[in-house]
Amino acid sequence: MKKILFLGTLFVTLFANSQAFTGKGDSKLYMGANFQEYAIGVNAGYDIGLGENISVGINSSYALDIPNGIDADFLDRFDVKARFNANLGSVINISDKLDIYPGLSLSLKNFGGHLGARYFFSDGFGVYSELGVAFAKYNSKRLSIPEQIHNQFVANVGMLFNL
C-alpha cells in the first residue's frame, strides 16, 4: 500500500507541475522526425518566449531518405528557418500541459506557416506535433523534385525539452 501511495504521489507531482508555455524567457529545445512526400528526415529547433503568448525561434531540417532514386545534393536536403509563434495554450485554456501554436517561418527555401501542438508530461519533457506548408517559394518557376524538398506540406513529430 505504501508503494502504491508513493508512486501515486510521484506521478501527481511529476505531471501536475508541467506547463507547456510560461511566457517571456520560456525556452524549448525540440527534435524529431520530418515527413514529406519526397523525403523523410530529422528536425530540430529552439524557441524562446518573448511575451505572454509570443515566441521566436530557429528550426532546421535535413532530408535523410529520399525515395525513388531522386538525386538531391546537400543544399536540396537542408533547410533552416527563423520562426514566429503565437502560443495559444493560455488563451484556449484546455490544460496547462498543452500549447497550441500557429506561426510563420522564413527559411532558405520559402516563406511558410505552421500549426503545432505541444504536450508536456513533466516540467522538462514533452512531445510535439507540427504541420507546415509553404506560402511563397523563392523560385517562381516550376520546381524540380529535389527543389520541392522543404517546399511542400510537411509533418514533424518528436520530443520536446524545457531548458
Image (cartoon, rainbow, N blue to C red):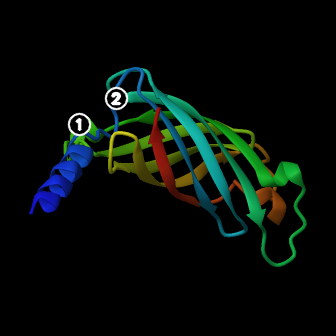
* Left or right of 145 in this view: 157: left
* Left or right of 88 in this view: 132: right
The answer to whether residue 144 is seen in the rendering is no
The answer to whether residue 28 is seen in the rendering is yes
Q: Position of residue 62 (x, y in %)?
A: 73, 53
Quickly name the residue at label 1.
91
- Split into 4 quadrants, where in the image is the N terminus? bottom left
Q: In the figure, residue 16 lies in which quadrant?
A: top left
Q: Position of residue 137 (x, y in %)?
A: 71, 47
* Residue in the image at 90% along x and 56% along y: 73
Q: Using the image, determine if residue 91 lies above or below residue 132.
A: above
At mark 1, the secondary structure is: helix
Q: Residue furthest front?
A: 2
Q: Residue furthest left?
A: 1
Mark 2 → mark 1, Cα distance in angstroms = 8 Å
* Left or right of 70 in this view: 102: left
- Say few, some or many: other residues with alpha carbon within 10 Å of mark 1 (under 14 / 14 to 19 / 20 or more): few
Find residue 53 and name its label.
2
| Total residue callouts | 2
Residues at discs 2 and 1 in contact (Cβ within 8 Å): yes
At mark 2, the secondary structure is: loop
Q: Amino acid at mark 1?
A: Val
Q: In the figure, residue 106 lies in which quadrant?
A: top right
* Residue in the image at 63% along x and 51% along y: 43
* Residue in the image at 65% along x and 45% along y: 136
